[in-house]
């Protein structure tokens, strides 16, 4: 276990180092922030002063070296626009994105697994076929369009839910969270549902396929032959054995949901990291863009590590020592 963990940490450090090169170089070739941040009416002396203040007068290799040195000290630079540390800006927006993403993933499991389980147990019934037909909509409908329709129906027409913003928040561990207040939950309902639709369809279809495959296994036939109740066969033998692929997908989708919540946050004006990165891209705020991308890399690596550890909890036959 310890040897495997050390090996994974070494691999994670290598991946982070490789991503620093890709992210830093990629961001620095998409445009020049000086053209946006400095007024066209500024004289050459003013332009030179601002360029030097941002460190943009240095060669790219030296800028990267300074970036790595700052990264080792937990400093990813200061925002060109807000004149604040980039990590502080992202940290202030992270709770909003995390609670939205986690809620969306929990909804995908809460809806997707039971619906997929039912569709797998009764694939030829009307309800089972309807569930599978409805799952196609989750894959097909554009996220921004679904968001607008949710606002039109539940906010404008029915007036049940607020359309934008985060609402009232409560404090926990020094951070502000929407799920601690009723008003915050009402504001979070539509964006979380919008963000979860694709994942619900994915988990639903994965669960159905796993159930259909597992029901044909010999150990399921043997369990039924021993006289075990249908509920025990389904919830102990079938569901437990299909949870490993579901855990893998849900773990990866959590990282993807955090990274790609941009559209949902823009539609519902949710003040999370996604909206911040869109605003930063519009003004080429390089430190914030790089800090955001590096944060996403770290989140993905951490989630993959947690998923690997969960393997042994769900199936003791999986040995961490055998993993590369």
Image: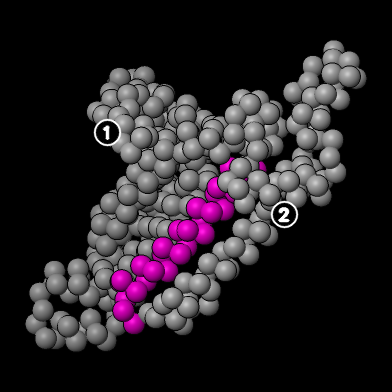
Give percent across and percent down for residue 84: 59, 29
- Counting from the top left corner in percent of width and height, residue 159 is at 30, 19
- Residue 224 to residue 306: above or below: below
Q: Is residue 299 shown to the viewer in this render? A: yes
- Left or right: 196 with respect to 59? left
How many numbered marks does the figure carry? 2
In this view, the residue in front, 125 or 93, is: 93
Label 1: how many Cα within 10 Å (few below 14, some 14–19, many 20+): some
Q: Which mark is residue 180?
A: 1
Whether residue 134 is in magenta: the answer is: no
Residue 190 as seen in the image, left or right of residue 21 = left
| Residue beneath the point at 24% across and 64% down | 122
Say which residue appears at 81% left-offset and 29% top-offset.
Answer: 51
Q: Toward the viewer: 142 or 4?
A: 4
Q: Residue at x 84, y 40 (%)?
A: 58
Per the image, label 1 sits on a secondary structure element best described as: helix
The quarter of the displayed image where residue 186 is located: top left
Q: Is residue 17 above or below residue 27?
A: below
- Residues drawn in magenta: 290-317
**Is residue 305 within the magenta segment?**
yes
Q: Tell me which corner region of the image, top left, top right, bottom left or bottom right, holds residue 244.
A: bottom left
Q: Position of residue 319 (x, y in %)?
A: 39, 81
Picture disc at residue 21: 2
**Main secondary structure type of the part rendered in magenta:** helix
Q: Earlier in the sequence, mark 2 or mark 1?
A: 2
- In the image shown, does 205 or 191 lie closer to the viewer? 191
Q: Residues within 10 Å of mark 2 (few under 14, many from 20)?
A: few
Specify the label residue 297 is tagged with.
Answer: none
Q: Secondary structure at mark 2?
A: helix
Name the residue at the right extreme: 44
């Amino acid at each position: 276990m310890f040897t495997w963990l050390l090996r994974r940490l070494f691999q994670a450090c290598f991946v982070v180092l490789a991503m620093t090169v890709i992210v830093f170089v990629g961001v620095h070739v998409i445009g020049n922030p000086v053209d946006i941040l400095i007024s066209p009416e500024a004289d050459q002396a003013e332009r030179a002063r601002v360029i030097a203040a941002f460190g943009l007068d240095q060669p790219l290799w030296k800028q990267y070296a300074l970036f790595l040195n700052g990264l080792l000290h937990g400093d990813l630079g200061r925002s060109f626009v807000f004149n604040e540390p980039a990590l502080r800006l992202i940290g202030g927006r992270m709770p909003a994105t995390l609670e939205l993403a986690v809620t969306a993933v929990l909804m995908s499991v809460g809806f997707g697994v039971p619906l997929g389980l039912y569709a797998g147990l009764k694939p030829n019934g009307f309800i089972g076929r309807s569930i599978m037909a409805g799952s196609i909509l989750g894959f097909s409908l554009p996220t921004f369009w679904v968001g607008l329709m949710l606002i039109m129906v539940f906010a404008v027409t029915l007036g049940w839910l607020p359309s934008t913003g985060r609402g009232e928040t409560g404090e926990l561990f020094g951070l502000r969270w929407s799920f601690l207040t009723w008003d915050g939950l009402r504001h979070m309902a539509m964006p979380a549902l919008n963000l979860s639709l694709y994942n619900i369809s994915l988990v639903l279809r994965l669960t159905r396929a796993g159930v259909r495959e597992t029901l044909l296994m010999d150990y399921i036939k043997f369990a039924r032959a021993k006289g075990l109740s249908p509920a025990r066969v389904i919830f102990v033998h079938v569901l437990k054995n299909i949870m490993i692929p579901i855990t893998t997908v849900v773990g990866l989708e959590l990282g993807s949901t955090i990274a790609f919540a941009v559209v949902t946050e823009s539609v519902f004006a949710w003040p999370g990291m996604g909206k911040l990165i869109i605003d930063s891209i519009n003004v080429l705020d390089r430190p914030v863009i790089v800090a955001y991308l590096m944060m996403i890399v770290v989140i993905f690596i951490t989630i993959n590590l947690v998923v690997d550890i969960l393997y042994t909890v769900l199936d003791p036959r999986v040995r961490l020592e055998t993993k590369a």
